[in-house]
Image (tube, rainbow, N blue to C red):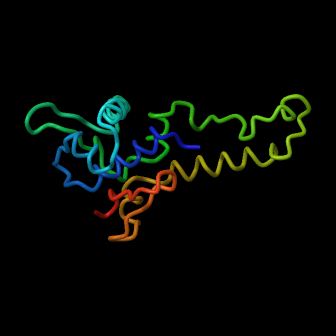
Amino acid sequence: MISTTSKYGIKSVCYLAQQPESRFVAIREISDELDIPFQYLTKLLQRLQQGGIIYSRRGNTGGVSLARPAEEITLAEILNVLEPGFEKCSCLLHDELCMKTGNCPFGKYWGEIQNRLHDLLNNTDVKWITSNSTEGSPITDATTGKKATYINK
C-alpha cells in the first residue's frame, strides 16, 4: 500500500524530527543510520524539500533539517509529496466485476475506508509518531525485518 519511497521518506523525516532543532544532518548520516541507499535518499530528500517538508543547506555545516516543527508535518503531507494522488486511490481490488456490473462486494465500504484513512493520515503528525514509540525499543520494519532505530534512539 505504501511504497518504499514513502517508507524511507517517513523514516527520514522522523529521524530529522528527533534531532536538535538547529542541527543540520548530513545526508550520509541519515543514509547510514537508516540503511537507505545514499543516491536514492538524495533524490527522495530533494522531493521533500520541493514539497516544503525539509530545508537543505550547503557547505561544511550543511545538511538537511525540518522546514517546520514536527507537529506541523502530517503523514498525509509526506505521502502526497512522495506519491502524488495517494489519497485518490479509486479501487482497492481493481476487479473487472466492479467495472462491468457494479456488483463489487467491497464497493459500498470503500468510500468509508478511504475517508477514515484520509482522516488518520491528516491527523497523525511526525511529532506524535516520534514521541509515542516505545523508548529504547526499536521498531522492526515488517518488510525487511531490519530494526528501524530512528525512533527514540
Please give left or right for residue 151 compared with residue 123 in the image: left
150, 109: nearer the viewer: 150
**How many marks are shown on the rendered structure?**
0
Q: Is residue 89 above or below residue 113?
A: above
Q: Residue furthest front?
A: 145
For the residue pair 144 and 15, the one nearer the viewer reads as: 144
Q: Which quarter of the figure has residue 136?
A: bottom left
Identify which residue, 47 or 72, lies in the foreground: 47
Instruction: Indicate the quadrant where residue 135 lies.
Output: bottom left
| Residue plotted at (72% across, 37% down) | 91
**In the rendered image of this protein, does residue 62 appear above or below residue 7?**
above
Residue at x 26% of width, y 46% of height: 32
Provide residue 151's location: percent of width, then percent of height: 34, 60
| Quadrant including the N terminus | top right
Q: Position of residue 25 (x, y in %)?
A: 20, 44
Tell whether 132 sits left or right of 101. Answer: left
Question: Which residue is located at x 35 percent, y 33 percent?
Answer: 40
Residue nearest the observer in this picture, 3 or 103: 3
Could you say where residue 139 lies in the image, as x and y percent from the top left?
Answer: 42, 62
The residue under the point 46% across, 47% down is: 75
| Residue 31, position as x, y percentages in the image | 28, 43
Query: Which image quarter is the C terminus in?
Result: bottom left
Residue sitting at the far left: 60
